[in-house]
Amino acid sequence: MNTSVWEKTAPDRNCFRFYTIKLECDLFAIARVACEWGRIGSGKHPQRQVICFDSVEEADIFKKRQEKIREKRGYLLVQ
């Protein structure tokens, strides 16, 4: 499993956000990217989206694209 965690904090604008991107494979060799996002410290139920791909390469390309979007929007890589 390949995971990246992003955070964006701007206390002056009351902005405390996180975004997690996980590259996963299941037992049937289907690659998927799971994204979770929400407010830091908001609780146990963040927003979640899972997208399935036919190959790990396609999933990795999508994950890298999402990471570039997070960087452009001011998120910092935490992990």
Image (tube, rainbow, N blue to C red):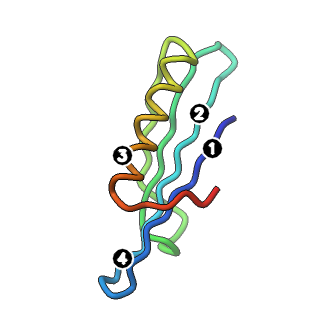
From the viewer's perspective, tell me whether residue 39 is left or right of residue 34: left
Residue 66 has which mark? Answer: none
> Residue 74: image x %, image y %?
37, 62
Image quadrant assignment for residue 73: bottom left
Give the distance between the C-alpha atoms of the residues marked 1 and 2, in whole angstroms: 6 Å
Q: What secondary structure is marked by label 3?
A: helix
- Callout 1 touching callout 4 (CB < 8 Å): no
Image quadrant assignment for residue 77: bottom right
Tell me if mark 4 has few (under 14), some (14-19) or many (20+) residues whose alpha carbon lies within 10 angstroms of its own.
few
Give the distance between the C-alpha atoms of the residues marked 1 and 3, in whole angstroms: 16 Å
The relative height of residue 2 versus residue 70 in the rendered view (above or below) is above
For badge 2, the amino acid type reads: Leu
Give the distance between the C-alpha atoms of the residues marked 2 and 3, in whole angstroms: 16 Å
Residue 23 has which mark? Answer: 2
Q: What secondary structure is marked by label 2?
A: strand
The mark nearer the N terminus, 2 or 4, is: 4
Give the distance between the C-alpha atoms of the residues marked 1 and 4, in whole angstroms: 23 Å
Can you tell which of label 2 and label 3 is closer to the viewer?
Answer: 3
The mark nearer the N terminus, 4 or 3, is: 4
The relative height of residue 51 versus residue 17 in the rendered view (above or below) is above
**Disc 1: which residue:** 3
> Image point 47% across, 23% down: which residue?
52
The mark nearer the N terminus, 1 or 4, is: 1
The mark nearer the N terminus, 2 or 3, is: 2
**Disc 4: which residue:** 15
Q: What secondary structure is marked by label 4?
A: strand
For badge 1, the amino acid type reads: Thr
For badge 4, the amino acid type reads: Cys
Count the labels in the image.
4
For badge 3, the amino acid type reads: Ile
The mark nearer the N terminus, 1 or 2, is: 1
